[in-house]
Amino acid sequence: MAISISAVVVLGILVFIFVRKSGLNAAHAIVCSLFGFFMASTSAAPNINRFVTGVADMIGQIRF
């Protein structure tokens, strides 16, 4: 059984948890989100995407 969850959904849930429980305030979450949007339009975006895809593939190959 394979479960596929978008990285955006997972990161959104983590930000929500950090805001609610760990003292990350809303301003920090907004700054992090804006940083992500601006980073996506740079020349580093393809490299970041390949890295995240590689890590996700590596995790996906782990058999329990």
Image: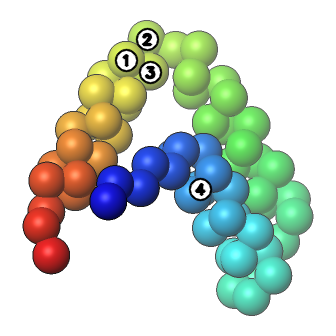
Query: On the image, which quarter does residue 3 sit in?
Result: bottom left
From the top left corner, tell me how far across and down residue 35 is, in percent: 66, 37
Q: Is residue 12 above or below residue 14?
A: above
**Residue 43 numbered tag:** 2
Q: Is residue 64 above or below residue 63?
A: below
Query: Could you tell me which residue is drawn at 36 percent across and 30 percent down?
Result: 48
The residue lying toward the viewer, choosing from 12 and 64, is: 64
Query: On the image, which quarter does residue 21 sit in?
Result: bottom right
Query: Could you tell me which residue is drawn at 67 percent across and 64 percent down?
Result: 13
| Numbered disc 1: secondary structure | helix
> Mark 4 vs mark 2: which is more N-terminal?
4
Q: Which is in the foreground here, disc 4 or disc 3? A: 4
Query: Could you tell me which residue is drawn at 59 percent across and 56 percent down?
Result: 11
Q: Which is in the foreground here, disc 4 or disc 2? A: 4
**Residue 46 numbered tag:** 1
Determine if residue 4 is in view: yes
**Residue 45 numbered tag:** 3
Determine if residue 55 is in view: no
Q: Which is in the foreground here, disc 1 or disc 4? A: 4
Do the numbered discs 2 and 1 sit on residues whose CB atoms are within 8 Å? yes
Q: Label 2 amino acid?
A: Ser
Q: Label 3 amino acid?
A: Ala
How far apart marks 4 and 2 lie (CA) works out to 22 Å
Do the numbered discs 4 and 2 sit on residues whose CB atoms are within 8 Å? no
**Residue 11 numbered tag:** 4
| Numbered disc 4: secondary structure | helix
Crowding at mark 2 (Cα within 10 Å: few <14, some 14-19, many 20+): few
